[in-house]
Image (cartoon, grey):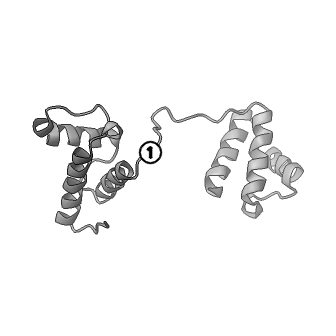
Amino acid sequence: MTRALQRKVFMGCRALGLDDDTRRELQAQVTGKTSMREMSEADLKDLLNVLENRGFKPAKNPNWKPTADRPDLRYIHALWGKLGRAGVVTPGRRALNAFIRKRFEGAWGHVPVDVDALREAEEIASVLEALKAMCRRNGLRVTK
């Protein structure tokens, strides 16, 4: 979390046109520390609040979607991510949705627009079993 906050501070300083010397002076004023390595998470949040008060608005990623609210759907995302990191599938939500459409549309007669819209326990179980089987075939360890 602290590394992400450090990145946001750097982005904020860049957006406000602060050079390194000015940033370090601001850090010393706000936290009493000139190095971000010495700062706690609370110090970094204080520094970020000062930057936001001066007009910095952190950009939100337009492609970001919240994680699924159900544990079984989060597990689907986790398995897909594991397969993606292993190079077995293309990582990402779009690829996962395409996989579900291709694999299950004929069996179900329909597929939701997004994996997180799945609500039927049998459909979720089918997707989980297919992903677990892919993991096992590719030598990836699966829990549950």
Q: Which residue is mark 1?
A: 69
In front of the other: 52 or 110: 110
Task: Mark yes or no: residue 81 visible.
Answer: yes
| Identity, as a three-letter code, of the amino acid under mark 1 | Asp
Q: Quadrant of the N terminus?
A: bottom right
In front of the other: 122 or 32: 122
Q: Quadrant of the C terminus?
A: bottom left
Badge 1 marks a residue whose secondary structure is loop
**Residue 68 percent coordinates (x, y):** 42, 44
Place residue 140 in its image quadrant.
bottom left
Pick out the residue farthest to the front: 121
Task: Mark yes or no: residue 20 visible.
Answer: no
**Residue 134 percent coordinates (x, y):** 19, 58
Going by the image, does 76 lie left or right of 62?
left
The image shows residue 103, relative to residue 55, as above or below, that is below
Q: Residue at x 81, y 48 (%)?
A: 21
Place residue 130 in its image quadrant.
bottom left
**Residue 18 percent coordinates (x, y):** 77, 39
The image shows residue 61, relative to residue 127, as above or below, that is above
Q: Residues within 10 Å of mark 1 (few under 14, many from 20)?
A: few
Q: Residue at x 77, y 41 (%)?
A: 49
Q: How many numbered markers are drawn?
A: 1
**Residue 85 percent coordinates (x, y):** 33, 57
Pick out the residue farthest to the left: 106
Q: Residue at x 23, y 60 (%)?
A: 132
Place residue 106 in its image quadrant.
top left
